[in-house]
């Protein structure tokens, strides 16, 4: 898979930019707060229709403007596709593939596959379970369209159930009506949990091997899925029993307390929870290796090498670790790496496209 071109309008601080001539290695340069991260984010948005740096889509619209639009050309297997995404402040949204409107996100997400290395990702271990669930959801959404469809439907049903819980709590509805929503939550939730368990199992072995190697055999990392119901045995039965056991508590709290929306991913380093018993450097190393594992898993499951986006992850890494990472990135099909045009980057990527960004203006030069 290869990104051939991109055009960006009114996205973050980028007013109107078009870039083409991308190579296998693409170095994004510029001073602080000039738009390097925003440029990489525009690529990631066309891949996932999401960003970890926003509360609402309004945050992505350039100040003073009323919309943003993104367009890119992707080539894979000798075939080209044009992807477009539009959002207006009046809540108007649309996505298109080859000029044709697409009604479902699941038909668009993953047409451009990406793996992102960024400061937000580096903090994943110490952030909330919401962020760790979101990370695995974004990974699986690019790998499996059925997963994204199931997840979207699950959250729709969850919203309906929570409304009913509020009504039951206020004695405005019969709690027997919860059965209808619970049955659908169980059916969809089991599919979601099964997919997550399979992904975590695959990532676990890759992460363990990478961390062991980089630590010189001193660190053993275990990745595990912390489910809100028992995963041994019959998942459907276990989910149903847990919902039944928590029914009264859910009514009191007016919220669904069991299901994949309450689950978490845990990192155990040398037998202890890495969230509490690991250094900043160790956490950084773990997440970088997790992202490398995600790259390998996506490549294996889809038969396509995702485009890799690398933004400011080298801070606080020693020179040896930095060098090892650059060597790994150098073996990937296509990367976009934000930084400075220093000797290390040009040394490892002698043939590259240089993308310079200054005050949201993008210029491209081939080296």
Image (spheres, rainbow, N blue to C red):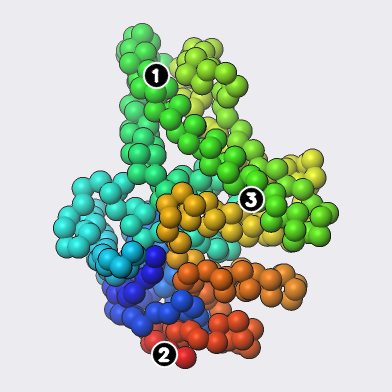
- Residue 167 screen position, x and y as percent: 35, 18
Q: Which residue is mark 3?
A: 206
Q: Which residue is mark 1?
A: 182
Residue 205 badge: none
Q: Quadrant of the N terminus?
A: bottom left
Residue 365 badge: 2
- Residue 353 screen position, x and y as percent: 45, 84
**Does 220 sit above or below residue 192?**
below
Give the Cα distance between marks 2 and 1: 56 Å
Is tag 2's residue or tag 1's residue first in the polypeptide sequence?
1
Identity of the residue drawn at 25% across and 46% down: 104
- Closer to the camera: disc 2 or disc 3? 3
**Does 80 sit above or below residue 241?**
below
Identity of the residue drawn at 65% across and 46% down: 205
- Closer to the camera: disc 2 or disc 1? 2
- Residue 329 screen position, x and y as percent: 57, 70
Which of 15/179 is in front?
179
- How busy is the neighbourhood of tag 1: few (under 14 within 10 Å), some, or many (20 plus)? many
């Amino acid at each position: 898979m290869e990104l051939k071109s991109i055009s960006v309008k009114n996205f973050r601080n980028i007013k109107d930019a078009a870039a083409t001539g991308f190579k296998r290695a693409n170095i994004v340069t510029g001073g602080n707060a000039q738009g390097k991260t925003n440029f990489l984010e525009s690529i990631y948005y066309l891949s996932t229709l999401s960003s970890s740096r926003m509360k609402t889509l309004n945050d992505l619209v350039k100040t003073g403007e009323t919309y943003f639009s993104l367009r890119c050309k992707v080539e894979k297997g000798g075939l080209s596709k044009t992807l477009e995404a539009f959002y207006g402040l009046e809540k108007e949204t649309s996505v298109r593939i080859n000029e044709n409107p697409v009604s479902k996100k699941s038909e668009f997400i993953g047409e451009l596959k990406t793996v992102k290395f960024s400061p937000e990702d580096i903090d994943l271990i110490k952030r909330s379970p919401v962020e760790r669930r979101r990370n695995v959801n974004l990974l699986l959404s690019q790998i499996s369209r059925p997963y994204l469809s199931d997840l979207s439907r699950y959250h729709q049903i969850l919203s309906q159930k929570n409304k009913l819980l509020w009504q039951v709590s206020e004695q405005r509805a019969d709690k027997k009506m919860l059965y209808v929503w619970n049955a659908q939550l169980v059916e969809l939730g089991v599919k979601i949990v099964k997919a997550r368990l399979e992904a975590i199992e695959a990532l676990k072995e890759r992460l363990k091997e990478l961390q062991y190697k980089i630590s010189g055999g001193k660190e053993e990392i275990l990745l595990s899925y912390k489910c809100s119901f028992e995963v041994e045995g019959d998942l459907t039965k276990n989910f149903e029993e847990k919902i039944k056991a928590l029914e009264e508590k859910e009514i009191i709290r007016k919220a669904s307390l069991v299901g994949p929306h309450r689950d978490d991913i845990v990192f155990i380093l040398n037998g202890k929870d890495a969230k509490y018993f690991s250094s900043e450097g160790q956490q950084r190393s773990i997440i970088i290796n997790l992202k490398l594992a995600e790259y390998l898993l996506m490549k294996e499951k889809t038969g396509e090498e995702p485009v890799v986006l690398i933004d400011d992850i080298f801070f606080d890494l020693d020179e040896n670790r930095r060098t090892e990472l650059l060597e790994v990135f150098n073996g990937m099909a296509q990367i976009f790496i934000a930084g400075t045009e220093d000797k290390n980057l040009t040394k490892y990527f002698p043939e590259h496209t240089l993308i310079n960004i200054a005050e949201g203006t993008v210029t491209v030069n081939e080296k």
